[in-house]
Amino acid sequence: MQQATSQPITSRDDLHASLRKGGRPREQWGIGLESEKLVIDAATGEAADYARIREMLARLEGLAGWQGIYDDDALIGLQGKRSSITLEPGGQLELSGRLCCDLHCNRRDLKRYVDQISVPAAELGLCLIGFGIQPFTPLNQIDWLPKKRYAIMGPYMLKTGDMGQRMMKQTAGTQVNLDYLDEADCVRKLRILQWLAPVFYALFANSPLLDGVPAGVLSVRGEIWSRTDADRCGLIPAFLEKNASLADYVDYALAAPLYFLQRAPGLIDMTDQRVTFQQFIEQGAKGEVACLNDWELHLSTLFPEVRLRPQLELRTPDSLPPALALAVAALVKGLFYDEDALAYCESLLTGLSLSQHLELYRSSWRQGLQTPFAGGELLDLARVLVKTARKGLQRQYLQGYNADDESTFLDPLAPILEQGQTLAHQVLAGWRGSRGEKLAHLRKICHYAF
């Protein structure tokens, strides 16, 4: 047996404690923005191959504090002093920004990164776009990133749904990380974030295409995730109920099969045995016993709309241009870091049954803001929530939590809310003509720049 990389798991309390440890005092709360975008050929719109993406990263390595992250000899990312740049399976580029005390810090991090990465991208004839789906390139023509974990995950995805590899290689999203005070606050926020997932799909829909053709839905990324892996994606039903607890998240994670274990010198593939983490604890597998590091790695391979590891991570919105990515963070901060705003959110959807929640969720990525809700549309709810978030951010400023009023970060949402037309609608409205005309239209709307 290879030596375990951490202490063995002795009880369920160990798992529970690992999730609880993210709690922080209100004064230490921050917001983290993880911003994925697509890397495409500036002339053709096709997905960039790994060789060009690697060269783009290599030209930044050693500059401005960026150091290379390698998987064997493959350059797969850059580590900065407080942020990191990583590559997703199909070459999508992600900035994992630091946990910032205010949105201005998030913006500075994002702008610094965009300014730096745009130079080698342009030199190599590449373009970065905040769009949720590869605009033209078919799945089988997109390179796999040479990373060991993807060599395990990719084949396994073929067994769990019909769109898992599309999720890995063709999609890009926006994630926001947020803090909580204690276990009760964690569970409350996780539950409300799940309740609001339909709004985040509808308001930030930005992937209406599949292989260059209108997909008939506004966020095809939402449809793709729903057909990826029911064991680890989508909503966690227990957290649509008011009596949910952190034990429900432990149960959810224990029931999911393992992808792999990290042992020197690499990964042990566990997908051939389809062992749940519960079974791994009880019986072991491949001569290994379950350790806390295995649990923490396992948590990172779960992909629900809201993930706990141990900060809360909202994963719903599509990839977006920088100003709208920051608006997602502002909406989350305004609603979830102000008690009045959070209580109001909690009151809006408590009357829905489990089946109604699920139907609203499924409809949101298909119909967007026009999804029927409470005698009106999700657009009505989105308008109310943005107004509530604006007041929440203003109160946080008056209470001294923010250095200034951050409600202006919500301003890019005004045209969407006024017209009820998301970026997906704008893309579809001009998706005609030659490939060059379509690409120019897409770049105008979704170009990743300030």
Image (spheres, grey):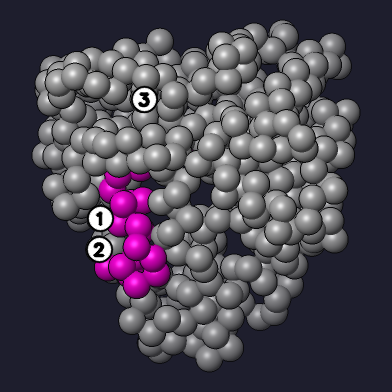
Three-letter residue code for mark 3: Leu
Specify the quadrant that holds the C terminus.
top left
As measured in the structure, the alpha-carbon distance from the residue carrying label 2 to the one carrying label 1 is 7 Å
Q: Quadrant of the N terminus?
A: bottom left
Labels 2 and 1 touching (C-beta < 8 A): yes
Q: Which is more N-terminal, label 1 or label 3?
A: 1
Task: Give the residue number, with chain letter if any, for mark 3.
Answer: 428
Dot 2, how many residues are within 10 Å of its Cα: few (below 14), some (14-19), or many (20+)? some
Secondary structure beneath dot 1 equals loop
- Give the extent of the magenta segment: 155-174
> What element does badge 3 sit on?
helix
The residue carrying mark 1 is: 147
Q: Which residue is mark 2?
A: 151
Q: Residue 314 at what x, y percent from top left?
A: 59, 42
Residue at 58% from the left image edge and 75% from the top image edge: 255
Q: Residues within 10 Å of mark 1 (few under 14, many from 20)?
A: some
* Res 374 quadrant in image: top right
